[in-house]
Image (tube, rainbow, N blue to C red):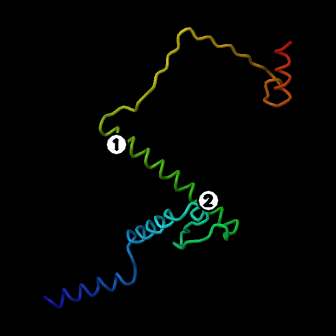
Amino acid sequence: MRSVSRSASTWRTRSAAFGRSGREEDDEEALRWAALEKLPTYDRMRRGILTAGQEVEIQDLGINERKNLLEKLVKTAEEDNEKFLLKLRDRMERVGIDNPTIEVRFEHLNIDAEAYVGNRGVPTFLNFFVNKIMVIN
C-alpha cells in the first residue's frame, strides 16, 4: 500500500512540475499588479503588464501594441462593471428587494419651448445664429 501512495505522490509532483494551475497564475499576476501600484506615480503611469505576464515600458510599445493594451483595459472594465451589476440585480431579486426609484414632482412648473421645422431645425452653427437673431428681432 505504501508503494501505491508513493507513486501517487510522485505523479502529483511531476504533474505540478509541468504546469501551474490557473489560480497560481492569477495570484502571480495580482502580485505583479500590486508591485506596480507601489511604484511612484510617474513610473506607474509608464509601466504595464501585457498578457504574456511581462512588465513593459508603455513608451516602448508600438502603435498596435498600445491599441491592443487599451482595448484590453477598456474591455476588462466594461465586463467587470457588467458582471457586478448583473450579480447585484440577481441578488436583489433573490432577496426580494425592489430597485430603488426616484420620483420628482414639480408644482407650478411652466415650460417654454421653440421648435424649428425644415432646414432651420437642423443643428448647424449657421442655423443656431439665424435662430438667435430671429428671437432678438
Residue lying at 53% horizontally and 10% vertically, measured from the top left:
107
**N-term mark: 1 or 2:** 2
Q: Please state which amino acid type lies under the numbered disc 2.
A: Leu
Q: Residue furthest front?
A: 40
Is residue 45 placed above or below 8 in the rendered structure? above
Which residue: 39% across, 76% down? 20
Q: How far apart are marks 1 and 2 (CA)?
A: 32 Å
Asked if residue 16 is positioned above or below residue 131 in the image, the reply reads below
In the image, residue 123 sits, relative to residue 9, either above or below, namely above
Locate residue 86, reporting x and y percent: 42, 45
Quadrant position of residue 125: top right
Disc 1 crowd rating (10 Å Cα; few below 14, some 14-19, many 20+) is few
The label shown at residue 91 is 1
Q: In which quarter of the image is the N terminus?
A: bottom left
Nearest to viewer (mark 1 / mark 2): 2
Which residue lies most toward the top here? 108
On screen, residue 101 above or below 110:
below
Residue neighbourhood size for the residue with mark 2, other residues' Cα within 10 Å, grouped as few (<14), some (14–19), many (≥20): few
Helix, strand or loop at label 2? It is helix
Q: Is residue 23 left or right of residue 41?
A: left
State the residue lying farthest toward the left: 1
- In the picture, the disc for residue 77 is none
Q: Could you say which quadrant of the image residue 116 lies in?
A: top right
Image coordinates of residue 88 in percent, x first then y, are 39, 43
Label 1 element class: helix
Q: Name the residue under label 2.
A: 70
Q: State left or right for residue 87 relative to residue 129.
A: left
In terms of image quadrants, where is residue 124? top right
Tell which of 80 and 43 is nearer to you.
Answer: 43
Closer to us: 94 or 40: 40
| Residue sitting at x 43%, y 48% | 84
Identify which amino acid the numbered label 1 is placed on. Answer: Arg
